[in-house]
Image (spheres, rainbow, N blue to C red):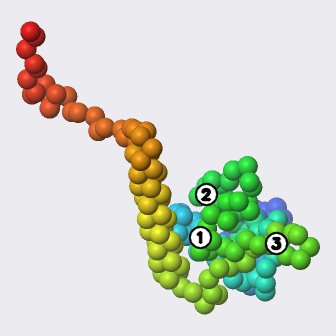
Amino acid sequence: QGAPQPQRGPRRIRRRCPRRSRAMVAAAGGAPTRPPANIEDFLWNIHTVLAAQPGPFPIDLVKDAYSKHLGHKCAIERFLVVGEGGLAATLKRIPHIVNVTTDGTGATVVSASQSADLSKAQLIDADSAYRRELIKKNALAKAKAQAAGAATGKAPAPTAKAPVPAAAAAAEPEAPEA
């Protein structure tokens, strides 16, 4: 009974989650979410950020609003090609999600194309319908270009032939030499 307890140094007070990055902590009002795993998740995130805004807001603030609302970095380059036209040109390619306009001062502003009460499934359906529409338009434009090429006497653009498998090529008899 008599052995004295060894004295311990001052207790360290451990902070909660000291290793967690500050990027994962969302602003008040929303819990942090995981970064999107696919394009549909990213489009849903963009929609929720834009729908949460009271009205159109400057395009320069989109990435900041996304980070504050969802608690992670807006990695638009991971899902959409951002070219020389910048963020405005990129967002104009998804008009079924984002309206890109200019306000009275000439500044580019963005807003949600869909209603704020839209579900994720409805947004995915709208995206699928838009993609199908684009495929039809591209096929129609290609057919018109080929028809115009044939009407002017030009040969249509060559199409790539599927490579012949080696087994099929070996099975075909060669023409005898004359």
Q: Quadrant of residue 26?
A: bottom right
Q: Residue at x 44, y 60 (%)?
A: 140
Q: Is residue 9 left or right of residue 146?
A: right
Residue on which the image places disc 2: 80
Mark 3 near mark 2, Cβ–Cβ under 8 Å? Answer: no
On the image, the x and y values in percent for residue 17 come to: 71, 67
Residue on which the image places disc 3: 102
Give the residue at the far right of this rendering.
Answer: 105
Res 78 visible: yes
Mark 1 near mark 3, Cβ–Cβ under 8 Å? Answer: no
Q: Is residue 136 left or right of residue 96?
A: left
Distance from label 1 to label 3 (Cα)? 22 Å
The quadrant in which the N terminus is found is bottom right
Kind of residue at disc 1: Leu
Work out whether residue 152 or residue 60 is closer to the camera in this orientation and state it.
152
Q: Residue at x 64, y 87 (%)?
A: 116
Residue on which the image places disc 1: 43
On the image, the x and y values in percent for residue 171 come to: 9, 28
Considering only order in the chain, which callout, 3 or 1, is on the residue closer to the N terminus? 1
Neighbourhood count class around disc 2 (C-alpha, 10 Å): few under 14, some 14–19, many 20 upward: some
Determine whether 43 is above or below 54 in the image.
Answer: above
